Amino acid sequence: MNALDTNILARFLVRDDVDQAERVYRLFKAAEAEKTVFFVSIPVLLELIWVLDSAYKIPRQEILDALGELLLLPILVFDAQSAVRSFISDAKKNNLDLSDLLIAFDAVSSGCEQVITFDKKAAKSDFFILLSK
């Protein structure tokens, strides 16, 4: 199995470079025909969220919808897939930073109780605890 880099998923979703988007499409079609899969790591998802938000200015709901659609592709295997599903579901119900929320769901799925942080906004969530003096 091979893993995908953020730029592959970004081209697939945004299609801002027609040539690269077409190459990704062909790659995915071939994988589907050959019944092979690609791995998508949590760091790639974190970077994808950042790219879609910061570089492309895609609204939060559209980012969450796109991630949900990626989860439906049988050629993609996600790291901590149940955590990613829970993250998407929860993110639709609150305004927490998407990256922080994905970090929290990944940590919880790994058996952690909370994420220790200096981020006061994140610490308003039950998933985080503020490291104070």
Image (cartoon, rainbow, N blue to C red):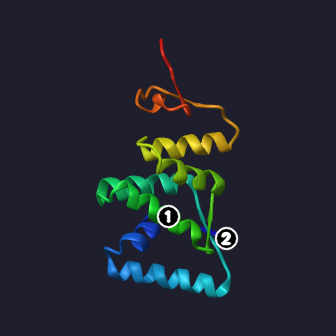
Quadrant of the rendered image containing residue 56? bottom left
Q: Quadrant of residue 103?
A: top right
Judge by depth and name the residue closer to the eye, 114 or 3.
114
Q: Label 2: which residue? A: 1
**Crowd rating for badge 2 (residues with CA inside 10 Å; few <14, some 14–19, many 20+):** few
Q: Secondary structure at mark 2?
A: loop
- Residue 4 seen by the camera: no
Viewport quadrant of the N terminus: bottom right
Q: Residue furthest top?
A: 133
How far apart are labels 1 and 2 at the CA level?
A: 13 Å
Residue 70 tag number: none
Viewed as shown, does residue 65 lie left or right of 55?
right
Q: What residue is at 61 percent from the left and 83 percent from the top?
A: 32
Residue 109 located left or right of residue 115:
right
Q: What residue type is disc 1 on?
A: Asp
Give x and y (percent) for residue 7: 42, 66
Residue 53's x, y, as percent?
Answer: 34, 54
Residue at the spot x=36%, y=59% of the render? 52
- Residue at the image position 39 percent from the left and 52 percent from the top: 50
In the rendered structure, find residue 5 and report the number of the disc placed on it.
Answer: 1
Q: Residue 39, percent across and down?
A: 61, 65
Where, by quadrant of the figure, is residue 49 drawn? bottom left
| Any part of residue 98 in sight | yes
69 up-or-down from 48: above or below: below
Q: Amino acid at mark 2?
A: Met
- Rendered view: 128 above or below 90: above
